[in-house]
Amino acid sequence: MNAISSDIEAIFNSPVVAALRADLALALRAAAHHGLGEGVCNHFSVALPDRSDLFLLNPRGLMWSEIQAGDIVMIDATGRKLAGRHEVEPTAMFIHAAIHRIARKNCVLHTHMPYATALTLTEARGLDTTLSQNAMRYHGRIAIDDQYNGLALDGSEGERIANAMSGADVVFLGNHGVVVCGERIDYAYDDLYYLERACTAQVLASSTGRALRPVRAELAERVAQQLQGERLQSALFFEALRRILNPD
């Protein structure tokens, strides 16, 4: 094993990265538990501490419900796999590597979860953040990318998506799905879960055929600040999922 490979192996198996691998695997199992996955598709990634050029990612071909820490792989800023026993799906490398590199996001969760994806098929393309309380937590945090161009099979499409985010934490990808970003895995997963809850409420309310009653934008902004000002609930939620979903 050469010196570079030895260094990569040491990083990949370090206690800090091992803990991140466990948390990323837990987020994937939680997403499966909550019905947010889609076959063996879609991807979650997180940057390594103090190494903005290295990222952890779920592998190709595994159901999210079965993924454990040992299944997580490590890639570099170009999407090249550096460590791990599984392969990486090409669109994951192009989308996630670009968002980490260009948008400077630490944790990147991409899903085709049903109700959020349903809203990407509408004329508005995304969530109305002045409706439910859950929706208000995303007020001022959402970008819309309505230029669907097919599968992200080259670097340019991933870069286009990353640039379309314009600093937002959440991006609705027209005719495609969503990306939710966060500074920590537990925060990002909490936002992913409640985003789908908010989208579910909006789709169900719209299905009644009755007029919807949004709140004032100023109130939605205040609620967003209240919810983002204290994230203990996000950490407690993730720890509860750890107790429920971790194998004995």
Image (tube, grey):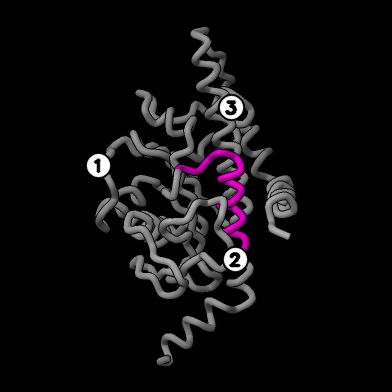
Label annotation for residue 20: 2
Query: What secondary structure is the magenta-colored segment mainly?
Result: helix
The percent coordinates of residue 122 (x first, y second) are 37, 24
Q: Is residue 29 magenta?
A: yes
Left or right, 130 with reference to 80: right
Quadrant, the C terminus: bottom right
Category of crowding for the residue at label 2, using alpha-carbon neighbours closer than 10 angstroms: few (below 14), some (14–19), many (at least 20):
many
The disc labelled 2 sits on which kind of residue?
Answer: Leu
Q: Is residue 231 something that shows in the picture?
A: no
Label 3 with label 1: CB-CB less than 8 Å: no
Q: Which mark is residue 53?
A: none
Q: Residue at x 41, y 87 (%)?
A: 4
Q: Which of the numbered marks, if any, corresponds to residue 218? A: 3
Instruction: Rate crowding at label 3 as few (under 14), some (14 to 19) or many (20 or more) other CA atoms within 10 Å.
Output: few
- Quadrant assignment for the N terminus: bottom left
Is 125 located above or below residue 208 in the figure?
below
Residue type of the residue flagged with mark 1:
Asn
Q: CA distance from mark 2 to mark 3?
A: 37 Å
**Which residue is at the front of the view, 119 or 219?**
119
Residue at (47% x, 88% y) in the render: 6
Is label 3 in a helix, a strand or a loop? helix
Question: Which residue of the protein is positioned furthest toward the bottom in this rendering?
Answer: 2
Indicate the secondary structure of the residue bearing disc 1.
loop
Q: Of callouts 1 and 2, which one flags the residue occurring earlier in the amino acid sequence? A: 2
* Amino acid type, label 3: Glu
Q: Which mark sits nearer the N-terminus, 3 or 1?
A: 1
Q: Are marks 2 and 3 in contact (CB under 8 Å)?
A: no
Rendered location of residue 11, percent (x, y): 53, 79
Which residue in the structure is indicated by mark 1?
Answer: 149
Q: Which residues are magenta?
A: 22-38
- Measure how far apart labels 3 and 1 are at the Cα level: 35 Å
Q: Residue 166: x percent and y percent?
A: 39, 47
